[in-house]
Image: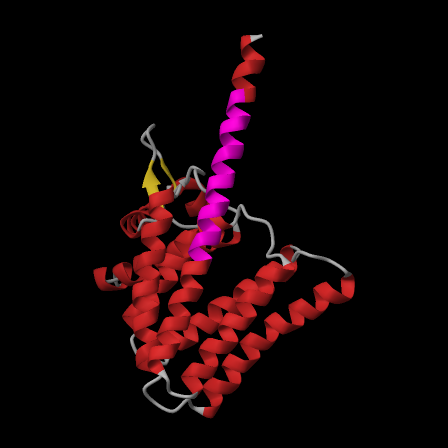
């Protein structure tokens, strides 16, 4: 019976490693694995029906990309973003996306791209209409999921139009890391959603007009506004956690 070549074995390992990488990444993005959660290589391997070797390699890649980090106890956990970490990520995202949208606006917008961008913006309008009709002020979990998909799609397509896949990969990874913290937030409120819709509409209009300078200015303002919201949420979350810890300590000191 012929023996399988090492090349075949390496190819299988690479395939499983990618499956493990995407599985862990998806669990982080969905909120199933929250910040600070311990990663079990054995559990991932069991879920995939594989050995631990390719899972360990996937975990190593996620460690190098910053989605996972070493805990004080020596385990590997989902990254817990600091305030400065959020600032750093938004600065990186702003630098790359602003460059990309300026490049994308140099050329006439293809009809298919315009149609897709209009559709993605339209989803935000639909969500606003749903909130208004239901008399609600905030998106529920399912609506927030729909918004996230359309929001990611809008920004990703603008970057893809700049024809730089490396920028797209870095920005996607950056946004995923921001969402590790963002998972803890509630849904967007009506007025926040209105602001996002208006920003997206103005950015798209500038790209349609091939006004790169205006598109860059508007996108920069849009990302900075998002950064301020995340930092306000982080500060609120930190205050709540501090108060909870104080109450816990007081309860044990009685």
Q: Which residues are magenta?
A: 226-246
Q: Residue at x 38, y 78 (%)?
A: 214
The image quadrant of residue 101 is: bottom left
Location of residue 103 with respect to 21 vertically, above or below: below
Residue found at the far right of this picture: 134
Q: Residue 133 location in percent, x, y?
A: 77, 66
Residue 206 shown in magenta:
no
Q: Residue 113 location in percent, x, y?
A: 46, 85
**Residue 19 appears in the picture as rendered:** no
Location of residue 223 with respect to 161 vertically, above or below: above
Q: Which sits in the foreground, 173 or 216?
A: 216
Q: Residue at x 52, y 53 (%)?
A: 30
Dominant secondary structure (helix, strand or loop) of the stretch shown in magenta: helix
Q: Residue 222 location in percent, x, y?
A: 44, 65
Q: Residue at x 55, y 48 (%)?
A: 185
Q: Quadrant of the C terminus?
A: top right
């Amino acid at each position: 019976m012929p023996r399988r070549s090492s090349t075949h074995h390496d190819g299988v390992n690479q395939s499983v490693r990618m499956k493990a990488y995407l599985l862990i990444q998806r669990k982080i993005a969905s909120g199933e694995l929250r910040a600070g959660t311990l990663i079990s290589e054995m559990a991932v391997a069991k879920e995939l029906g594989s050995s631990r070797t390719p899972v360990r390699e996937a975990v190593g890649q996620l460690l190098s990309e910053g989605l996972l980090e070493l805990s004080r106890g020596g385990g590997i956990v989902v990254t817990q973003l600091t305030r400065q970490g959020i600032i750093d990520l938004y600065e990186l995202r702003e630098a790359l996306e602003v460059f990309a949208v300026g490049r994308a606006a140099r050329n006439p917008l293809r009809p298919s791209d315009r149609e897709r961008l209009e559709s993605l913006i339209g989803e935000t309008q639909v969500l606003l209409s749903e909130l208004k009709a239901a008399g609600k002020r905030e998106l529920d979990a399912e609506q927030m999921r729909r918004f996230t998909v359309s929001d990611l799609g809008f920004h990703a397509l603008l970057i893809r139009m700049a024809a730089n896949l490396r920028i797209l990969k870095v920005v996607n990874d950056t946004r995923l890391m921001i969402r590790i913290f963002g998972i803890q937030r509630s849904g967007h409120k009506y007025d926040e959603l209105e602001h996002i819709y208006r920003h997206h509409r103005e950015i798209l209009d500038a790209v349609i007009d091939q006004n790169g300078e205006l598109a860059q200015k508007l996108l920069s303002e849009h990302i900075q506004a998002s950064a301020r919201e995340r930092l306000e949420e982080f500060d609120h979350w930190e205050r709540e956690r501090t108060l909870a810890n104080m109450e816990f300590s007081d309860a044990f000191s009685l």
